[in-house]
Image (cartoon, helix red, strand yellow):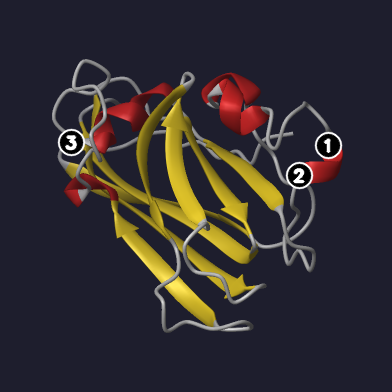
């Protein structure tokens, strides 16, 4: 089950902010969005390796997909992804967050710095319009990661010794469609 929301109607040139968030319960993900190396982590398809919210065990993969509707004729102005995480092991060099779509890795980066020790909790924020593509094939996206949001899904993974306390996606749209 995916986390969903929709927007019914916008007036001319009105800017609407759509916010989605989750911090407990089932962890929804759209499997087609994830590259096979991510979906099969660590070596085989096995739900035992899937992380849940506030996971306390190390060596897990957190997969999550937001589901929403961008009405026809809307333009995405901006988008932000926020999360709150906890370092479970004290390791900083192998925990990664990645944004994916249709089996392609759009962006990835480390979560922890070398001075962030075990049990460190922090908020992490990404302005999706400002992300560099991290050596991603430029044919996947046009100018910005914002283009990947038009399909109504935003998918991400987090591995492997990080507990996720909450995730949030905020998208600002405008347009004429009523």
Q: Is residue 102 left or right of residue 127?
A: right
- The one nearer the camera, 131 or 23, is 131
Q: Is residue 27 left or right of residue 134?
A: right
Q: Are marks 1 and 2 in contact (CB under 8 Å)?
A: yes
Q: Are marks 3 and 1 in contact (CB under 8 Å)?
A: no
Q: Is residue 78 left or right of residue 98?
A: left
Residue ID for mark 2: 50
Label 1 Cα crowd, 10 Å radius (few <14 / some 14-19 / many 20+): few
Q: x and y percent of residue 31 in the render?
A: 64, 24
In the rendered view, would you say 105 is above or below 173? Answer: above
Q: x and y percent of residue 116 in the render?
A: 47, 82
Q: Residue at x 49, y 78 (%)?
A: 122
CA separation, marks 3 and 1?
Answer: 46 Å
CA separation, marks 2 and 3?
Answer: 43 Å
Q: Is residue 14 left or right of residue 68?
A: left
Q: Quadrant of residue 73?
A: top left
Residue ID for mark 1: 47
Which quadrant is home to the N terminus?
A: top right
In the rendered view, would you say 69 is above or below 170? Answer: above
CA separation, marks 1 and 2?
Answer: 5 Å
Dot 1: element: helix
For discs 2 and 3, the disc positioned in front in the rendered view: 2
Residue ID for mark 3: 12
For discs 3 and 1, the disc positioned in front in the rendered view: 1
Label 3 Cα crowd, 10 Å radius (few <14 / some 14-19 / many 20+): few
- The one nearer the camera, 71 or 51, is 51
Dot 3: element: loop
């Amino acid at each position: 089950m995916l986390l969903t929301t929709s927007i019914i109607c916008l007036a001319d040139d009105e800017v609407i902010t759509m916010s989605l968030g989750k911090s407990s319960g089932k962890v929804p993900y759209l499997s087609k969005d994830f590259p096979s190396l991510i979906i099969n982590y660590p070596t085989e398809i096995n739900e035992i390796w899937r992380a849940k919210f506030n996971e306390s065990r190390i060596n897990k993969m957190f997969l999550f997909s937001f589901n929403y509707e961008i009405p026809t004729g809307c333009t995405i102005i901006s988008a932000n992804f926020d999360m709150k995480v906890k370092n479970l092991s004290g390791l900083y060099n192998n925990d990664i967050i990645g944004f994916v779509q249709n089996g392609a890795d759009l962006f990835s980066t480390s979560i922890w710095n070398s001075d962030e020790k075990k049990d460190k909790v922090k908020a992490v924020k990404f302005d999706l319009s400002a992300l560099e593509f991290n050596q991603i094939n430029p044919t996947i996206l046009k100018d910005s990661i914002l283009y990947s949001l038009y399909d109504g899904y935003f998918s991400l993974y987090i591995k492997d010794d990080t507990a996720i306390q909450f995730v949030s996606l905020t998208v600002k749209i405008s347009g004429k469609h009523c």
